[in-house]
Amino acid sequence: MSKAPIGISGFSLYLPPYRVDLRDWSEWTGADWNKIRAVVGTGFRLLGPDQSVYTMAANSVLQLIRNYDIDPSRVRYLALGTESSTDNSAGAIIIKGMVDAALKAEGLPCISRNCEVPEFKHACLGGVYAMKNALRFLGTDGDDSLAIVVSADKALYRQGSSGEPTQGAGAVATLLERNPSIATIDLREAGTASDYRRVDFRKPLVNRNGTGASPDFVDIPVYNGKYSTSCYIDEVQRALEDMYRRRGLVATDYLRALRAVFMHRPYQRMPETGWSMAYLFALAQGSRDDQAELARYCEAADVETAALIAELSGPHDLKQFAVRERIADDVFPLSLRVTRAFRQDAAFSNVISHKVRLGAKRMRELGNLYSGALPAWVAAGLTEAAELNVDLTGEEILMVGYGSGDAADVIPMRIVDGWESATRTIDFDAALEPAIDLTREQYKAIREQGQVEALDYQPHAEFVVERIGAESAPSFEDAGIEYYRYIQ
């Protein structure tokens, strides 16, 4: 007797109300607004006073339960994917505690006492790893129970750095179950890859001068932008190749036929670049006709086709670039030149931009949500498809997750009949409201002091940090522990 299919039945998104308009930010900093708009996006959110990664996560989970009329007692798996957690002991259980308290206050059943509560951390891939393990749970000992995965993060960069406009904060809760309402997922069809990249993107828990632990530095990553882009391209390609092998796919045929792809997006342009590079890799390894197509792009870029194929064929030992002397070098210099020429070709629209189009406009407002970026884009893309009456039933759509350091997963999902109803329940646009545009002074105050005066916002139907414990005595300790309150 075959088992019931497993997959995704719902999403819920929570964003902090505090918004930085990137056009305003460009005026504050002297950045080129036209470039920022084209490459990065239009805005991002910041955590404000009395908010944390845990309150965002709990807000999205509670919304998911309400919006989809979930029986909480059936939830036996609640996982947190994050790289921004601040408690090195507890994680998802904190979220469960908050949600249970709110449900109990409303006279509703709590999440099952027999619920597993793991936390997954791997840069921006923690949410994907949490989802994969939720699917494995449902496929083994989960029986007819439900699983919820919440991906919650805050992305912060030093003021004045190249990463500053790519900040963001938010949480996405995903409902998974047997006989799903949106899409089925079979992990036997997925691909994965990983390799250690040293200085790609890290968050060491030590002061930058090496003198010891310092919470001031926990949220600010050590990163090397150009090298990180190369790592993203390479690891995604390795995961795709794993999927091609496992499924016996012809890469070029698959990429051309795919209806849509959703990728980890640290900023607006990165998925487009990453998907373009995936197509160049496929052409380089393809048939005579594929390589003839590649030659056309090479000619437009004034690059020899043989030289490009040699560059794409590798081997690619990126760690040799992870040193001061080479960190600013391009790992794929010819490929990036050809990619720029490819953008001007008529084929680019059908093969690349058309496949990463669904939901892209909404995502320009979110900034980088780290682990939440991929599920947020899936939710945004499905929302747009439902609005435009795009028939995705039976279509395969590819999810591409990536986490710096680094690792990648490519996971196909197949859209099921009736997906539109569950998708409309997401109510994506409701998560974009309210949006309170910060002034330059308010932005700096939140970034530098974590507090700001005159914020015109009163929390409603959400969790807040009521206080942070400060006692450290032999009889009682709670120093650093957050206490939460649900505001009706």
Image: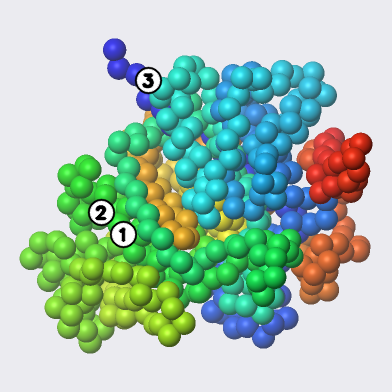
Q: Nearer the viewer, mark 3 or mark 2?
A: 2
Callout 2 touching callout 1 (CB < 8 Å): yes
Q: Total label count?
A: 3
Numbered badge on residue 4: 3
Residue type marked 3 = Ala
Identify which residue is drawn at 85% across, 42% down.
Answer: 478
Classify mark 2: helix, strand or loop: helix
Disc 2 target residue: 241
Vertical position of residue 288 compared to residue 28: above or below: above
Task: Specify few, some or many for label 2: CA neighbours under 10 Å numbering under 14, 14-19, or 20 or more.
Answer: many
Asked if residue 377 shows in the view, the reply is: no
Secondary element at tag 3: loop
Q: Which mark is residue 237?
A: 1
Residue at left offset 74%, top offset 27%:
100
> Cα distance, mark 1 to mark 3?
31 Å
The residue sitting at the front extreme is 474
> Local crowd at mark 1 within 10 Å, few (<14), some, or many (≥20)?
many
User: Residue at point 52% right, 65% down?
Assistant: 201
The color scheme shown is rainbow
